[in-house]
Amino acid sequence: MKRRDVNGIIGFWILRLCVAMVFTVLIIILYDITSKGIGKISWQFFAAMPRNGMTEGGILPAIVGTILVTFITAVLAIPLGMGCAIYLNEYAGDTLITRIIRISIRNLSGVPSIVYGLFGVILFVQLMNLGTCILSAGLTLGLMTLPWTITASEEALKNVPNSYREGAMALGATKWQSIRTNVLPYAIPGMLTGTILGLSRAAGETAPILFTGAAFFLPHLPKSLFSQFMALPYHLYIMSTQHHAISKVRPIAYGTALVLIVLVFAMNLLAVIVRYRLRRIKME
Amino acid sequence: MKGLTRLLVISTALALLSTGVSLAADSMLQVKGSDTLINMVQKLAEEYMAKKPGASIAVTGGGSGTGIAGLVNKKCDIANASRGIKSSEVDDANKKGVDPKRVVVAIDALSIVVNTRNPLSQLTVEQIGKIYRGEVKNWNEIGGSDMAVSLYGRQSNSGTYDFMKENVMFGEYSPNLKSMNGNAQIIEAIKQDISGIGYVGVGYAKESAGIKVLEVAVKPGSKYYSPFNSIDVKSGRYPITRPLNQYLNGTPKGLARDFILFELSPTGQAIVEKEGFFAIPDEYQNYNNETLGRSGQIGESPMRPEDLLTNPGAG
Amino acid sequence: MTNRTKIKDAVIKNIFLLNGVLVVAVLIGIFVLLVMTSIPAFREIKLSQFLFSASWNPTANFVVPSYGILSMIVSTFMVSVGALIIAIPLGIGTAAYLSDVASQRVREIAKPIIEILAGIPSVVIGFLGIVLVGPFIARVFHLPNGLNALNGSILLAVMALPTIISLSEDALKSVPKSYQEASLALGATHWQTIMKVKLPAAISGIIAATMLGMGRAVGETMTVLMATGCSIAMPSSFLNSVQTMTATIAIELGEVPYNTTHYYALFGIGLVLFIITFIINMTADIVLRKYQRVLK
């Protein structure tokens, strides 16, 4: 006869409660932002410039600014990140130095985003004299994304069985040819997944762009990569703290928050789709 | 992989091309600094850009300190400041080849605000100083209800923060100060805090329900004045009056000069008043003309703005 | 293989080598530049005063400017530890549920949900701290506003949860099935197996997960900047307004003229942050790798 496991019953209910609380938190977050932000969403919100001291109008410059900055981040992080991962995993031996490098890179992804912002101020804004602009901010975010991209790409490369590489080399291919035909096609989806996730994180970051280019209000869209820019996360920050009519613009703040999380989710979704394509390729 | 590489190369090339082409074209006027001025200057900029299509003015905040630092670092053209420039900042500027010149665009009566449910409605400058230095910890020490004082102020980048220190407190802030990001945040906080006290530019105090603006006397026994009374403010009888400044590198030229002339014109000054601040009196117009290198004085010879405000001690 | 192919191969190898070296150099450069920009501060400020004084007043004009970051350090750790107090039980409980109790379907739904939670930008969480959590705390504790350390801890817990959950779940899943089967064979209940066999076996992995969550909390900027009230006094309770190290940099960096003592001091804070988070992450990483090796 099975004894009733009272401890177990209580225990499992506690665990269920934990999970329920976590899910509830997410639901509260999404519900609050969606319900209070959806009212602002309209074609005008996306396409119009802010007016009347930013109490009316849309958030077009913030959307454009975020897209431009994320583009620069991608230009830096994708080739350099993937290339570094390829070097570390395919060419470099398993020496102490490479192991130290790998550990350092992994841990650099835990460094606070504001510290990357500090670095961006010294290197890009001052030393390279780029000033506060899209380029400085994008490069700063790119650096922040690099450790993430490198780590994710390395994992993807490691998942490709060695037999693939050896098979190609046995048939007479050079090292690069074997990588290009037998490793990269299988690793690229995983590398891209990690990179896109890193980019979605970069798009939502505020601290690194605070002092490298984000501006409170600009009367028109950025004219070049050397212009200052508005950005979605910074816009949400100033709408909720620094604006001179905080309660009046609260709906705009909610709308901005909604647009931001939809953008981030869309990028995450893209990464997930890429990941499923990976599974399909591997099965073929 | 090849396709991806090609795509990246093309887009990078396009991006770089676009920057090369437009490097010459980016002639936007950068105005940066005080949160007290930002609302008003933004309105002025919007009106100006409506009248002169093609002109491009960007107004950003960050506090007076940020604006002046921006001017010194040659990152902005006009620095909005709700305080005077410090001598250390002037030295720093000169070292970097920047010659700060001042224009006064409005007058502010710094308003002391409390919750509507606070029974007090008047304070002296000395009492305000004691409260913000942390020497008065409970409202009942100065005749109010029995509740601990809850201090709200700005952050150290704010000109208003500095102005309070130099002209009201004559000492350092209590560490219990809650540093808010801007005038609006202070108002929002006071609305919910019956034991709170804060300071904001008069333009922010005018339209806010839920807060009470205190009348201030220069010393015990003197008359109490309200910051909303334009005559008392312009004559300096309201003790905490200050000029709102814009600093530039050298004599204003080009777009900056034209914009400033607009700000000082009757149209511009009407916008200043509409935003809740006060238009500059004639003596300041003379001072500004000096800076702008304009001739034509109204009344007596120009005086420095510091001499124009009645000495708070004289009452 | 032709000579041309060999040369092309060597060139490509060197391109990748250059790439790798460049990236590593830049990443090391971050540390080096931080150190170089902080050092001038310590010509004027004594290190002991910097780390152990609670008085931060760089813009003082009536007294000598002081650069003590002790209350910021305390504030940072206060909100982070508070966050862990909330997130550890919730996180481990959720992880245990997902690894041992949940059906495959629940697990498939949970994974994206946790990823979504992880993807929410910090500024959005901070915004919710102002508009949602703050008023709630104010009502419950009868305070004028809810911008304090407790608010910060709750928000940071939300941000640390996904890390703690997914890594703890991985740790629990890595426990060899043989442990579980042996325990059940000896007559233990499912619950006892989880509590007395699996959790202890996975403890290093769980500790690593917790430390990574802590690292995340310590390094957060926007969330605490918006929700903790920004008061530089040394906090005496979770209901006090506090200002963390990250918030101080974010507030003050914009206003300092370049290359002044105040400027260098802010970089000094950045360096302290870098060192703290690097150590936390490095330790967690070592613990994690050791755990994974032991189990294999």
Image (cartoon, rainbow, N blue to C red):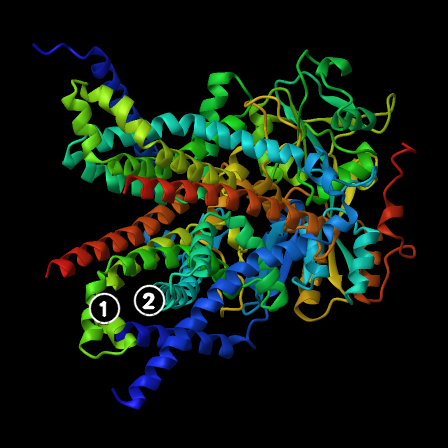
The residue under label 1 is which amino acid type? Arg
> 10 Å neighbourhood of mark 1: few (<14), some, or many (≥20)?
many
Q: Secondary structure at mark 2?
A: helix
Q: How many marks?
A: 2
Q: Residues within 10 Å of mark 2 (few under 14, many from 20)?
A: some
Q: In this view of the protein, which residue sits in the foreground, A156 or C61?
A: A156
| Place of residue C191 in the rendered image (x, y in percent of width and height, measured from the top left) | 22, 20
Write down the residue under mark 2.
A90
The Cα atoms of the two marked residues, 2 and 1, are separated by 10 Å
- Looking at the image, the residue that sits furthest to the bottom is C3
Tag of residue A165: 1
Residue sitting farthest toward the left: A1
Say which quarter of the image contains residue A148: bottom left
Q: Is residue C80 left or right of residue B278?
A: left
Q: Same chain, marks 2 and 1?
A: yes
Q: Nearer the viewer, residue C113 or B60?
A: C113
Q: Quadrant of residue C156?
A: top left
Badge number at residue A122: none
